[in-house]
Image (tube, rainbow, N blue to C red):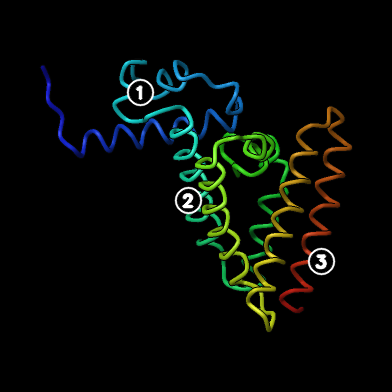
Amino acid sequence: MVRYTKDHKQETKQRIIATAGRRFKRDGIDGSGVATLMKDAGLTNGAFYAHFDSKDSLVASAIAGELDTLQANLVAQAAPGAAGLEQIVRWYLSPDHRDNPVDGCPNAALLDEIARSNNDTVRQAYTDGVLVVIDGLAARMTPENPASARIKALSLLGLMAGTLQLARALTDRKLSDNLLEQGLRNALALVEAETGP
C-alpha cells in the first residue's frame, strides 16, 4: 500500500477543486457528475470521498476557489482607482470573456444554479467569495460612504454578470456583440459616476 504525504493529499484536493471549477463553468453544476469531475482530475471515482463528504462540499469549495481566482487574477491585479475598474469592466464585458466561460467569472456561468441550490454551504461559499470581489471593486470607488461603495460595486457586478449571461444566451452574434457594447457603456458610465472623471 502506497502512503502519501499530507501535502500530496492537499495538492490532489486542490487539483480536484480547480478542475471541477472549470467543468462547472463549462457544463454547469447539475451537468457535471462526480465520475466526470474525477476523470478531469485524473483520478478514480473511489478517490472522491477521501477528499469530500459530498458533491455539494466540492461545489462549495470550487465556487470559493473560482471567486478567489477571480479576485487574485483580475480584481487585485488591476490598476488602482477608476483605471482599474475600467480594466475590469472591459475584460468582463468582452467578446473573449463571453466566448470562453471556462476561463472566466463564475458569476455569469453559475449564478442561476447557485440561486436554485438548497444547500446553505454552497450559497454561503458564494456569498463569502463574492463579497471579497465586491470589496475589491468598491475599494476603487471614491464615494464618501464605504457602505454605499459596496452596494454600488454589487450593482456593477450585477450589471456585468447579467449582461454577460444574456449575451451568451443569444444565438444572434451581432445582437450579442451590440448587447456587450451597450453593457460596457452602461458599466463605464457607472464607474465614472462613482470615481469621478
Q: Amino acid at mark 1?
A: Phe
- Label 2 – label 1 distance at C-alpha: 22 Å
The residue sitting at 53% across, 50% down in the picture is: 70
Counting labels gives 3
Q: Nearer the viewer, mark 2 or mark 1?
A: 1
- Label 1 – label 3 distance at C-alpha: 46 Å
Q: Residue furthest bottom?
A: 144
Horizontal arrangement in the rendering, residue 26 relative to residue 176 (left or right): left
Which of disc 2 and disc 3 is earlier in sequence?
2
Do the numbered discs 2 and 1 sit on residues whose CB atoms are within 8 Å?
no
What is the x, y in percent for residue 83?
65, 69
- Label 3 – label 2 distance at C-alpha: 27 Å
Q: Residues within 10 Å of mark 2 (few under 14, many from 20)?
A: some
Q: Residues within 10 Å of mark 3 (few under 14, many from 20)?
A: few
Residue marked by disc 2: 68
Rendered view: 68 above or below 79: above
Residue marked by disc 1: 48
Q: Quadrant of residue 10?
A: top left
Please tell me which residue lies in front, 36 or 80. Answer: 36
Instruction: Name the quadrant of the C terminus.
Output: bottom right
Q: Quadrant of residue 98?
A: top right
The residue sitting at 59% across, 42% down in the picture is: 106
Q: Helix, strand, or loop for circle 1?
A: helix
Q: Amino acid at mark 3?
A: Ala
Instruction: Name the quadrant of the N terminus.
Output: top left
Q: Helix, strand, or loop for circle 3?
A: helix
Please tell me which residue lies in front, 196 or 138. Answer: 138
Do the numbered discs 3 and 2 sit on residues whose CB atoms are within 8 Å?
no
Q: Nearer the viewer, mark 3 or mark 2?
A: 2
Q: Amino acid at mark 2?
A: Asp
Which of disc 1 and disc 2 is earlier in sequence?
1
Residue 189: assigned label: 3
